[in-house]
Amino acid sequence: MTDLLATRDLEMHFPMERRSFLGPRDRLHAVDGINLRISAGEAVGLVGESGCGKSTLSRLICRLADPTAGEILLNGRSITDKSAAEFGRSPLRRQIQMVFQDPTESLAPHLTVFELIADPVRRLLGVTDKTLLAKTVRDSATAVNLPEALLTRYPHQLSGGQKARVGIARAVAVNPRLMVLDEPTSALDVSVQATVLQLLDKLRRERGIALLFVSHDLTVVRLLCQRIAVMYLGQIVEEGSTAQVYDGPRHPYTRALLSAVPTLQPRAVKRQRLEGEPQTPINPSPSRCRFGGRCPIEAGLCIEKAPDLRDLGGGHLARCHFA
C-alpha cells in the first residue's frame, strides 16, 4: 500500500523555565524523532502509557501544532511548510480530521447536533446552499447510525455514545482521507465501545478512510487495527503488524504491557511488573536507552549507547539491543 501520511524525524520539544540566565533552557522532549507511516484505508494503533507523547503526536499529525523539527508528508507532499494556522485555512485541512477524547468537552453546548455537523461542512467544503447542507448533514448522521430525530437536540440531551457519534459524524462530513482518534472510547461503557469500534471499522472499509487510533487499551486496539506502534517517553519502541506485536513482542516494554492485559484464560506468560522509576523527559540522555531504570534486561550497553529502531524482519521494528 502507498503511504497516505508519513512523518520524518518528527520532534516536539517544549521549552521550560530558565533556572539561570547563563545556562541553556531545559526542554521537555514530548515527541522525539518519530518516523511513522499510515497507508490509505489502514488502521494504525498508537499505544503507550499516559505521558508518553501519544496525544502530542496526534496534534502534530493533525497540524493543530507546529513541530520543533521534522516533516509531515500527506500523499508525498510536505504539509509542514505552512504553520498550523495557515494549514487550517488551506484546502488540505479537510483531508485530516481529529476526533477528540472527551466528546462532551469538544462539542459546543449552545449548538444543536445539526449545527455541530454543519459547521465544518460550511467552513471546509464551502457549502452554503441550505438544501445541500441539510442533505450532507443527514447523510453524515446516517453514516454513523445517528437517528435524524437527534439532529435538533443539544449535547447535554445526548448519551455518551450519541455524543461520540456526533464527533465522528463531524469528521466524516467533510470526506477526510485520515481520521485521528484520541482515545474516543475511553469514557464509554464496554457495550457502547464495541458499537463505536464496529462503526469505525465500517467507515474504514466502505469509505477507505485511514485511521490513527490512539489508546492505552491494548484489547481495543487489537480489535480495530492492522498495525500497531508502541510509544515510550516520546519514542516509538516497537512497531509491526497486530499479529507480530501481540504474538511475538520483541521489546521488554511491550511484553510488560501485554502481560498486564486482563484475561479469563490461563496466562501463557507471567505478569511482568516494572520496577524502578521512569526517566525524566526533560533533557533526556542521548546515549542511554529511554527504558533504562525500569527494564528487566538492562545491561551495560544500554547505558553506554541508545538503541536504534531496527527492522527485525517482515516490517517488525524494535528499539532494543537485545530484541
Image (cartoon, grey):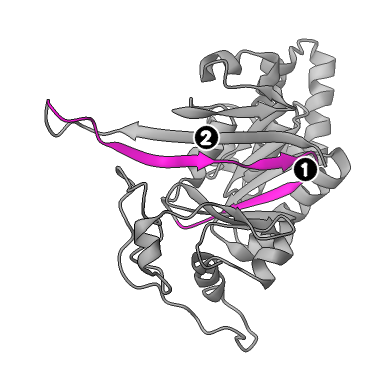
Three-letter code for the amino acid on which mark 1 is drawn: Val
Q: Would residue 68 appear left or right of 155 to someone viewing this image?
A: left
- Quarter of the view holding residue 41: top right
The range drawn in magenta is: 22-49
Q: Is residue 195 left or right of residue 109?
A: right
> Which residue matches tag 2?
10
- Mark 2 residue element: strand
Residue 323, placed above or below residue 317: below
Residue 264 position by quadrant:
bottom right
Q: Nearer the viewer, residue 4 or 50?
A: 4
Image quadrant in which you'd find residue 71: top right
Name the residue that disc number 1 marks: 144
Q: Nearer the viewer, residue 52 or 134?
A: 52
Q: Single out the mark in the foreground, 1 or 2.
A: 2
- Asked if the stretch drawn in magenta spans residue 43, the answer is yes
Above or below — where is 124 with respect to 178?
A: above
Identify which residue is drawn at 54% across, 76% down.
Answer: 259
Q: Is residue 2 magenta?
A: no
Which part of the image, by quadrant, shows the C terminus?
A: bottom right
The residue located at (57%, 83%) in the rendering is 269
Please tell me how many numbered marks the rendered image carries. Answer: 2
Coordinates of residue 18 in the picture (x, y in percent): 18, 31
Q: Residues within 10 Å of mark 1 (few under 14, many from 20)?
A: many
Measure the C-alpha gap from mark 1 to mark 2: 33 Å
